[in-house]
């Protein structure tokens, strides 16, 4: 990739953002839209600054839940995938339940989890984990199975043990798939955290951004609602960018998806 | 043969199965029918003696690779008996001598360097890292890749990747080297150069080679014996021995005997109706 297109990767979307925000501001001001219907970007920015302590605290809560859920999803999901590839029977017997977990809407399970688990924070993390874990399981399982047949023969010819096959062939082959799953899971963990907070509706000291949105909606404090929304979106983008960076770090040297093109 | 690679293992805890005077490979009535009922190989008899360069020549999809995989011990025959160095212990079993295998494609691990790829067979048997490093450096120099040890496979050309693959097969100094159309995907110039280098290696290492190809010219150029394999099911159609004392290199390619032998093999292939077969 040349320098011009690399710069365009950041400047082009930034230019679009500036243009959209400017349009938004202009429409709101020109039509005199009341702030409880659509606040102007400037009003949102002012609220962000004025309510920063409250909002940043809530962001910390939501982000903490999402990150904890993502970490658990990674550890648990990879472990489950490693169990799955040990035998087809295990995979065939258990995979439908992983799918069941995936297709059942989290809003439907969340009340149950919240009733069952005493500690609300743990319940919220559990909900977000349920949402985030599936792409990790399914991608890592496919990855661990996607071993080049010739390399598998080579390992057999050299009498590799099961362990050597796993650590030297299966796991490196699975990395690109795992990181693909991680990207999806990072977004899902945040969605799971927000949805679970909505269902739990916990306020007070442990209030997350979802609660602030809920409250601001009831109070018709629309600028704060927008400000909280903007923070959630920002958090999602940052988490996604972090996983992309991680994936590039791990794969850049060799995998087609990340390797620089040769001109 | 005096090459006993496993004896270099620390303490020589494992003794090699089989004896040195016996044929390297002996297939008696070996056949393969796949689970779906396709007969890949009709009963075949094949004996490969130490030091031979045997080429399995035949059209695509004729079962040459299946036969080669049975020789490697990767595929079990559905009928018949395989022996390696006089015993039924397959080369994939611990205690048996090693077999080097060069696949149709380079089959290198893309995530690690040429050096790590080549030394993989030594790493898998927990050879000491100094010993492995020395053996790896030696074979890399042998195939002319010493300057590319730290490169990733994707940074090498197709011919260089194939050399890395050959180096990996040679690093354990296997007494038997199996090659499955190794140069099929390369251009003619690279292929001829690698053919020459392979012959030089074969004489230097005094190993036994079983080589698979669908090129008559390549078979005649390389082998001491050519086994023509027919298709559906795979079977041995004809055999041609070539005087091992013949001239080598371009002298051989230009000689009347080369043309005469190529003509006879072509006639044999035509008579068996192999040339008219569709590709799979």
Image (cartoon, rainbow, N blue to C red):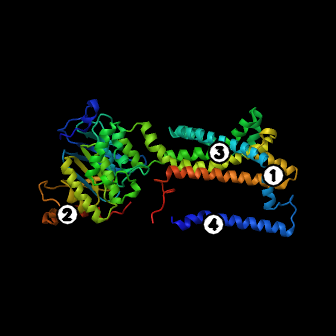
Query: Mark 3 sits on what residue?
Result: A132
**Mark 1 or 3, which is nearer the eye?**
1
Question: Quarter holding the N terminus of chain B?
Answer: top left
Question: In the image, what residue occupies the spot 25% across and 50% down?
Answer: B210
Of the numbered discs 4 and 1, the one sitting upstream in the chain is 4
Q: Which subunit holds the residue at mark 4? A: A
**Mark 4 or 3, which is nearer the eye?**
4
Look at the numbered discs 2 and 4 and tell me whether their residues touch, using CB distance below 8 Å: no
Q: Between marks 2 and 4, how big is the CA–CA gap?
A: 64 Å
Locate residue A233 relative to residue B201 in the image: left or right: right
Q: Quadrant of residue A101?
A: top right
Of the numbered discs 1 and 3, the one sitting upstream in the chain is 1
Structural crowding at the residue carrying mark 1, measured as other residues with C-alpha within 10 Å and reported as few (<14), some (14–19) or many (≥20) = few
Query: Mark 2 sits on what residue?
Result: B262
Question: In the image, what residue occupies the spot 80% across and 47% down?
Answer: A212
Q: Between marks 4 and 3, how big is the CA–CA gap?
A: 31 Å
Mark 4: secondary structure? helix
Q: Is residue A97 above or below residue B106?
A: above
Q: Between marks 2 and 3, how big is the CA–CA gap?
A: 64 Å
Q: Which subunit holds the residue at mark 3? A: A
Q: Which subunit holds the residue at mark 2? A: B
Locate residue A190 relative to residue B30 in the image: left or right: right
Structural crowding at the residue carrying mark 3, measured as other residues with C-alpha within 10 Å and reported as few (<14), some (14–19) or many (≥20) = many
Q: Quadrant of residue A13?
A: bottom right
Query: Mark 1 sits on what residue?
Result: A50
Query: Mark 4 sits on what residue?
Result: A12
Structural crowding at the residue carrying mark 4, measured as other residues with C-alpha within 10 Å and reported as few (<14), some (14–19) or many (≥20) = few
Please check whether the numbered discs 4 and 3 fall on a single chain.
Answer: yes
């Amino acid at each position: 990739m040349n320098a011009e297109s690399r710069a365009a990767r950041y400047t082009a979307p930034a230019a679009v953002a500036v243009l959209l925000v400017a349009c938004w501001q202009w429409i709101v001001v020109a039509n005199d839209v009341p702030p409880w219907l659509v606040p102007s970007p400037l009003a949102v920015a002012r609220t962000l600054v004025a309510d920063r302590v409250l909002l940043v605290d809530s962001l910390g809560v939501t982000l903490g839940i999402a990150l904890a859920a993502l970490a658990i999803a990674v550890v648990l999901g990879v472990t489950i995938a490693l169990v799955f590839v040990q035998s087809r029977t295990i995979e065939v017997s258990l995979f439908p339940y992983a799918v069941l977990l995936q297709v059942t809407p989290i809003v439907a399970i969340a009340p149950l989890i919240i009733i069952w688990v005493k500690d609300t924070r743990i319940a919220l993390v559990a909900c977000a984990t349920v949402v985030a874990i599936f792409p990790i399981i399914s991608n890592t399982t496919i990855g661990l199975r996607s071993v080049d047949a010739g390399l598998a023969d080579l390992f057999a010819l050299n009498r590799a043990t099961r362990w050597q096959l796993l650590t030297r062939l299966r796991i490196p082959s699975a990395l690109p798939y795992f990181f693909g799953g991680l990207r999806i899971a990072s977004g899902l963990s945040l969605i799971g955290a927000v949805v679970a907070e909505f269902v739990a509706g916990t306020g007070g000291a442990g209030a997350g951004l979802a609660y602030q949105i809920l409250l601001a909606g009831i109070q018709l404090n629309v600028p704060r609602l927008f400000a909280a929304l903007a923070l959630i979106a920002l958090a999602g983008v940052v988490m996604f960018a972090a996983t992309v960076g991680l994936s590039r770090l791990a794969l850049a040297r060799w995998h087609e998806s990340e390797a620089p093109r040769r001109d | 043969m005096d090459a006993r690679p496993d004896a270099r293992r620390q303490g020589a805890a494992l003794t090699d199965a089989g004896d040195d005077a016996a044929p390297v490979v002996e297939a008696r009535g070996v056949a393969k029918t796949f689970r779906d009922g396709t007969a890949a190989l009709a009963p075949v008899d094949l004996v490969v003696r130490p030091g031979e360069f045997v080429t399995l020549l035949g059209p695509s999809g004729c079962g040459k690779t299946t036969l080669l995989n049975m020789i490697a011990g990767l595929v079990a025959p559905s009928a018949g008996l395989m022996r390696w160095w006089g015993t039924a212990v397959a080369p994939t079993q611990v205690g048996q001598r090693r077999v080097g295998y060069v696949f149709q494609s380079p089959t290198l691990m893309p995530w690690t360097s040429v050096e790590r790829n080549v030394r993989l067979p030594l790493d898998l048997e927990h050879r000491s890292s100094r010993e492995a490093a020395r053996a790896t450096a030696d074979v890399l120099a042998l195939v002319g890749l010493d300057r590319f040890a730290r490169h990733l496979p994707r940074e090498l050309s197709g011919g260089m990747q194939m050399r890395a693959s050959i180096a990996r097969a040679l690093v354990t100094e296997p007494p038997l080297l199996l090659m499955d159309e190794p140069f099929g995907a390369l251009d003619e110039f690279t292929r001829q150069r690698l053919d020459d280098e392979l012959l030089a290696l074969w004489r230097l290492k005094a190993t036994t080679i079983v080589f698979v190809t669908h090129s008559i010219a390549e078979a005649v150029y390389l082998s001491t014996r050519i086994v023509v394999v027919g298709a559906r099911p795979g079977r041995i159609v004809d055999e041609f021995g070539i005087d091992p004392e013949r001239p080598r290199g371009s002298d051989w390619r230009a000689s009347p005997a080369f043309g005469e032998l190529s003509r006879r093999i072509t006639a044999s292939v035509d008579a068996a109706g192999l040339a008219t077969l569709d590709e799979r």
